[in-house]
Amino acid sequence: MKLNTHRWWRDAVIYQVYVRSFLDSTGDGIGDLAGVRAGLPYLKKLGVDGIWLSPFYPSPQHDHGYDVADYCDVDPLFGDLAEFDLLMTDARRLGVKVLLDIVPNHCSSEHPWFQEALVSAPGSAARARFHFADGRGPDGAEPPNNWHAMFGGPAWSRVTEQDGTPGQWYLHMFTPEQPDLNWRNPEVGTHFDHVLRFWLDRGVDGFRIDVAAGLYKHPDLPDSPDPEADARTRDSVNPLAWNQPEVHDVWRHWRSVCEEYTGRDGRERLLVGEVSVRTAREHAQYVRHDELHQAFFFDLLSAPWNADAFRKVISEAMQDIAGTGSTVTWVLNNHDQVRTVTRYGELGTEGSGLGAARARAAALLMLALPGAAYIYQGEELGLPEVVDLPDDVLTDPIFRRTGSRARIRDGCRVPLPWSGHASPFGFTSGVESAKPWLPQPAYFAEYATDRALADTRSFWHLYRDGLQLRAGLPQLGEGVLRWLDTQPGVLGFVRGDGLVCAVNFGTAPTPAPVSGTPLLSSGPCAPGVLPGSTAAWWISDCTNP
Ligand code: NOJ
């Protein structure tokens, strides 16, 4: 076993719980905190080190909780603070760490601060907590600059002043219901200090930080040099709206707050940032020793299923990020992305079986890489994306804001199947007639957790076995990786003294880099052969055959 003196987060495996889709204890069709609590033994059995809970704070749910109206409470939709405390108690007893999702870039338009700003005059202290500005053009009818919102449309909306006249504009980098906070106003930082301490005092182990390369904007809010590029992508490309140098001061400060708590009881708290920046080198700036502990490395998630592409992003991460003294935080799925099983599939060729085989192989690859890993709920079941949700059930604001063009995020958020043969598949405990907030397709029956647990060939067993081995093998977890010379289309690397991982990205079998039976493989794997779309782990003293 590994020594427990190492810093737990450096190679932790965290399970992302998208609360509204995990398990519903009340029968209203929406998952809740009591559901998460009921699911903890399942997650313990899977073998994860901790969970990250998507936002459950009071919110009008325009962006499913990423529009926070009160940072220090629980939305009645999900429970209450007492229920949260019970969840913490159970998690502590089971040894499962709990991370909360904190949203500092913007709040909800229903947050009392924004409501106050709306009824306050231009130039008031209430408006100074946000980015309010006069419009351009005749009568100020044009937005203050040419920035685009990430979810479509302009990044500015105009308010009506108290006297009924069209007034100032406010900035929102996502939807109009998510006004951006002005981090140049010290009141904002002070407020978030209070929020951090509120939850740390309730025992949480850390925070996933939403839009961690956001917060600060260029102080003059000038026009973007390439508004067309900003409009074309959901990536943070506008250099004046993202990745401003001042944001690093915030992370240094938040780290010091975490260290203060660690100093009191020895328990390390973790900050993991959702950092969307252009290069691994920029990304590395966020995980310097006194800033965030981790930042999701999304390049692995966005790499196409191709050995060269995977090798390039892994090598860059190892060189640029691990060089900071931090570890890389790998991720293949989350609540904003098409699930791997579907993303890696090539429908029309070998059907979805190919996507599933590749997703299994990618999972073993990820769990063998040095650093930490995040698993998105349902990934351990091999859930595919639900691609045929009818328009009238879609709730993602991106769909609405792009004129119904982008059907991006609902398909990976469909509530989990737990048991049974028909929806709600045990998602709503004890209420068979309950209607999940997004409809579950009939084929979810095949993926239900009870079936997955009973079938040793399931995704669930692959993840569980991988996690168990990872926890017990000193070669895995943090450390270095050494590439092996392999055939084109195959990636192979060695961890520590002889744990070999190889992935065949092609569809034809290839000689395995190690003879003998693998310790674990993502599909059937005879000694000496690595079948197509398969990954395997071996223990070997032969490090470069
Ligand atoms: C990133 C979150 O993952 C996403 O779900 C959310 O819509 C945006 N940030 C805005 O908060």
Image: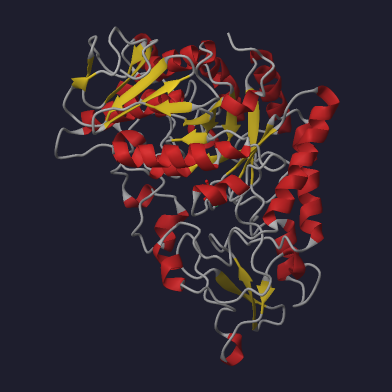
Give the mark count: 0
Is 109 in front, or is 270?
A: 270
Residue 140, compared with residue 364, is above or below; it is below
The residue lying toward the viewer, choosing from 413 and 277, is: 277
**Drawn side of residue 340 relative to residue 24, left or right:** left
- Residue 247 visible at all: yes
Identify which residue is drawn at 61% across, 49% down.
212
Residue 430 on image: x %, y %: 48, 20
The residue at the far left in this view is 349
Give residue 62's position: percent from left, percent from top. 54, 53
**Percent position (x, y) of residue 539?**
40, 10
Q: Residue furthest right?
A: 264
- Compared across the picture, whether 328 is left or right of 88 comes to left
Residue at 44% over, 23% down: 368
Instruction: Say which quarter of the image contains residue 239.
Output: bottom right
Quarter of the rendering occupied by the C terminus: top left
Residue 6 placement: quadrant: top right
- The colour scheme used to paint the residues is secondary structure
Q: Is residue 435 above or below residue 303?
A: above
Residue depicted at 47% across the width and 12% down the height: 469
Residue 61, how many percent across, how many down?
56, 49
**Does any portion of residue 419 appear in the rendered image?**
no
Residue shown at the point (69%, 78%) measured from the top left: 161
Relative horizontal placement of residue 16, taking residue 382 as reference (left or right):
right
Quadrant of the rendering where the N terminus is positioned? top right
